[in-house]
Image: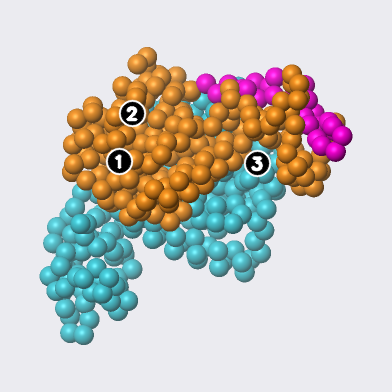
Chain colours: A cyan, B orange
């Protein structure tokens, strides 16, 4: 049985090492996880996992620091540029790449994207997506939450400050296979929408030094392609298939 | 725009290179894909992808062989032992590992599986799962469909004729990282259910020479773990990270 897990960065610090829980959080602990005064709770903070104990503070509940737990969020810095997908597919993409361990996700409104977002809709979506990656980072016990950018075009994304090692998933069998490459410590991965990149977007990516990488002859759904490329970077790094970039 | 795609092994062969389509298939081609007499259709057969043309045969429709298309379904033989998952998670697992390229899937009724299948339910599930992997293999343009076994226990699965290179996804950081290993040409990958393996199952797997492999400090959902290990084998093979087994 694992300890209940909370993100603590949003909790007010009452004193050094004592975080106040919201009523909702305390209620969840008591009723769903059957915690009581003195129960252990894992706290996630950026780059840290801490063990804490539940403590009553008048009418409220807080958690007090007990000890640091290992939080080896070591791995490459992965920026994922991901074409928006229809239905629940983009939610699933966010969940999986958060679990797998990307650092930042830039949702792309592509020329062939079926989904169109006006400003009001984009704000609402973004709030929902932020909640998804936050929940998911808790679920997978990651001390960091991926950054999530506002959706933008490929052209706009390329004006961001991106790592210089850049890869784009391709169906071109003459491109080098993904796993033939070593993993840089910092990289960008680009995965198109369901309808793939437009010629204009492809030319933008090529112009910005994105190297096409081949994922095999099967046509992967966009969210599976995102999982495959992210997993290559995280697992390859972990397995020592690294190169300094 | 890609050509419509059909699995042809179930279509009656009227003569050498001429396959009869069912009414449902012909209807789909005409109304959804706007095909007409002479339109091109891609046919998938075990180990082959063929280009065909639509041809009227009286009241019915058939497709006639035009030429072989490349069908490089080359890759390692991957047998995936996968714990049953609740809700839609197992469907998603089947879809993703079919796309990624496993050869055979053995669903496991594990000690900690939330899902319980009696015989009647297992038959119905199996029929549904077979449809899913068939549809998915068409979607991802694979000429082969993964074999799908009847659900069984870990102990029963280990009596099957399995490749001798065997790996089990572990959360033990002292196990070798997945990507530090080269990919054998034939291998078994085991991924547990949501509640992980029981002590008895773990000991069975160890006894059957399954090597624990470490996927990183994040706790992956079972279907993501299945995608990560399968993708390692397929991509690693493609990238030349192979070893003869």
Q: Residues within 10 Å of mark 3 (few under 14, many from 20)?
A: some
Quarter occupied by residue B144: top right
Secondary structure of residue under mark 1 = loop
Q: Chain of mark 2?
A: B
> Please, is residue B107 above or below residue B13 in the view?
below
Residue A173 falls left or right of residue A20: right
- Provide residue A117's location: percent of width, then percent of height: 65, 61
Q: Residue at x 29, y 46 (%)?
A: B110
> Residue beneath label 3, please?
A196
Mark 2–mark 3 Cα distance, whole angstroms, equals 41 Å
- Provide residue B32's location: percent of width, then percent of height: 76, 47
Q: Magenta stretch containing residue A12, yes or no?
A: no
> Please, is residue A38 above or below residue B90 in the view?
below
- Provide residue B59's location: percent of width, then percent of height: 85, 38
Numbered disc in front, either 1 or 3: 1
> Residue beneath label 2, please?
B160
Q: Chain of mark 3?
A: A
Residue A54 falls left or right of residue A10: left
> Residue beneath label 1, please?
B153
């Amino acid at each position: 049985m694992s300890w209940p897990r909370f993100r603590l960065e949003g909790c007010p610090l009452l004193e050094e090492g004592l975080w106040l829980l919201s009523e909702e959080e305390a209620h969840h602990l008591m009723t769903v996880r059957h915690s009581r005064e003195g129960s252990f709770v894992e706290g996630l903070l950026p780059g840290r996992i801490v063990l804490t104990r539940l403590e009553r503070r008048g009418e409220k509940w807080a958690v007090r620091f007990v000890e640091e737990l290992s939080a080896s969020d070591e791995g490459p810095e992965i920026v994922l540029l991901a074409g928006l997908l229809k239905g629940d597919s983009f939610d699933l993409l966010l969940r999986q790449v958060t679990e797998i361990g990307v650092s930042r996700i830039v949702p792309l409104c592509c020329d062939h994207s079926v989904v169109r977002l006006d400003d009001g809709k984009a704000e609402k979506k973004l709030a929902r997506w932020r909640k998804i990656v936050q929940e998911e980072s808790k679920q997978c016990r990651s001390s960091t939450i991926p950054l999530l950018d506002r959706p933008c075009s490929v052209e706009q994304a390329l004006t961001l400050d991106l790592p210089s090692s850049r890869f784009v998933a391709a169906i071109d069998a003459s491109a080098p296979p993904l796993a033939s490459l070593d993993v840089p410590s910092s990289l960008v991965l680009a995965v198109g929408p369901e309808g793939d990149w437009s010629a204009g977007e492809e030319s933008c990516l090529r112009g910005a030094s994105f190297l096409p990488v081949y994922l095999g002859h099967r046509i992967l759904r966009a969210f599976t392609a995102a999982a495959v490329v992210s997993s290559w970077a995280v697992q390859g790094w972990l397995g020592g298939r690294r190169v300094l970039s």
